Image (spheres, grey):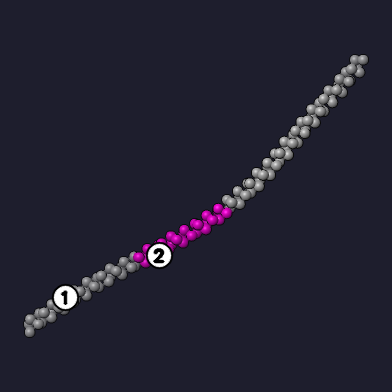
Amino acid sequence: MAVDEGCLREQVLLAENEIAFDEAIIEEREQGIQEIQQQIGEVNEIFKDLAVLVHEQGTMIDDIGSHIESAHASTAQGKSHLVKAAKTQRSTSSMSCLLLVIFGVALLIVVIVVAA
């Protein structure tokens, strides 16, 4: 019977060792799962921050687009003003030459009349 009791004790110790080993593995896996949960939470926060940045940049891109359209319209308007100013300058220049010629002729007539 002593042999049976020794064998039984050995089996009980072996079973206790297996249980302790299994509990250690379970605890290690639980810690690993908790770390993964923490990392998933951190990734979630990163994606939330990224979503905010993307939204803000979308707004900035929309603003840039409207500024580009406004600049295009202003440039077109400025171009038409420059064309109009060039035409006005040409007609004013022609008018000035004509007035200068008329003044010169009038002055010549006055000089001839005074000299005569």
- In percent of width and height, residue 109 lies at 88, 20
- Give the number of the mark in front: 2 or 1: 1
Q: Secondary structure at mark 1?
A: helix
**What type is the residue that disc 2 sits on?**
Gly
* View extreme (top): residue: 116
| Mark 2 or mark 1: whose residue is earlier in sequence | 1
Front residue of 23 and 109: 109
Front residue of 28 and 86: 86
Q: Would you say 50 lies left or right of 17 here?
A: right
42 falls in the magenta region: yes
**What type is the residue that disc 1 sits on?**
Leu
Above or below: residue 85 compared with residue 39: above
Which residue is depicted at the point 50% across and 59% down? 52
Q: Which residue in the protein does label 1 denote?
A: 14
Which residue is depicted at the point 20% across and 74% down? 18
Q: What secondary structure do most residues of the magenta stretch adopt?
A: helix
Q: Secondary structure at mark 2?
A: helix
> Which stretch is magenta?
36-62
Q: What number is the disc on residue 41?
A: 2
49 falls in the magenta region: yes
Q: Quadrant of residue 58?
A: bottom right
Which residue is depicted at the point 25% across and 70% down? 25
- In percent of width and height, residue 72 lies at 63, 46
Q: Would you say 10 lies left or right of 73 here?
A: left
